[in-house]
Amino acid sequence: MEGTSSEWRSYANYRGPYDPCSALVKRYDVPPEVTHPVQKSARRQYAPQEALRKGTLWPEYDSPYPPA
């Protein structure tokens, strides 16, 4: 898998034997909720103002996009 995080996955689309174009590698972000589906009761939380700025209450679910 490529990328700096395990939340990024990639795949190559199907390329037929007579397809003149090369296969494209696509990357997509898997949200942390998919890899951490169970919420623990004693989970660390952001302060209210920081949670509003980041868009999530829990640091484990903070998944910023990489810089372009």
Image: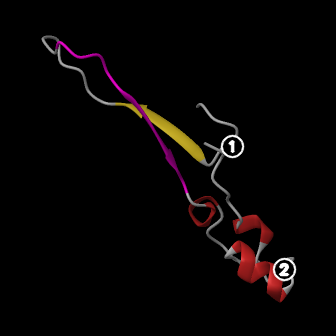
**Quadrant location of the N terminus in the rendered image:** top right
In the displayed structure image, the side of residue 26 where residue 47 appears, left or right: right
Tell me if 52 is positioned left or right of 16 in this view.
right
Give amino acid for label 2.
Gln
Residue at the image position 84 percent from the left and 80 percent from the top: 45
**Could you tell me residue 34's position as x and y percent?**
56, 62
* Disc 2, SS: loop
Q: Where 6 sits versus 61, above or below?
A: above
Residue at the image point whose x is 61% and y is 69% from the top = 37
First-in-chain label (2 vs 1): 1
- Disc ID at residue 45: 2
SS class, disc 1: loop
Residue type of the residue flagged with mark 1: Ser
Any mark on residue 53, and which?
Answer: none
**In this picture, which residue range is highlighted in magenta?**
20-30
For residue 35, which quarter of the picture? bottom right
Residue 16: percent from left, percent from top: 18, 18
Query: Relative to 65, is 47 on the left or the right?
Result: right
**Quadrant for the C terminus in the image:** top right
Magenta highlight on residue 14:
no
What colouring method underlies this structural image?
secondary structure
Neighbor class of circle 2 (other Cα within 10 Å; few <14, some 14-19, many 20+) is few
Residue 57 in the image: x percent, y percent? 74, 80
**Which residue is found at the position 62% from the left and 49% from the top?**
7
What residue is shown with label 1? 5
Q: Nearer the viewer, residue 3 or 33?
A: 3
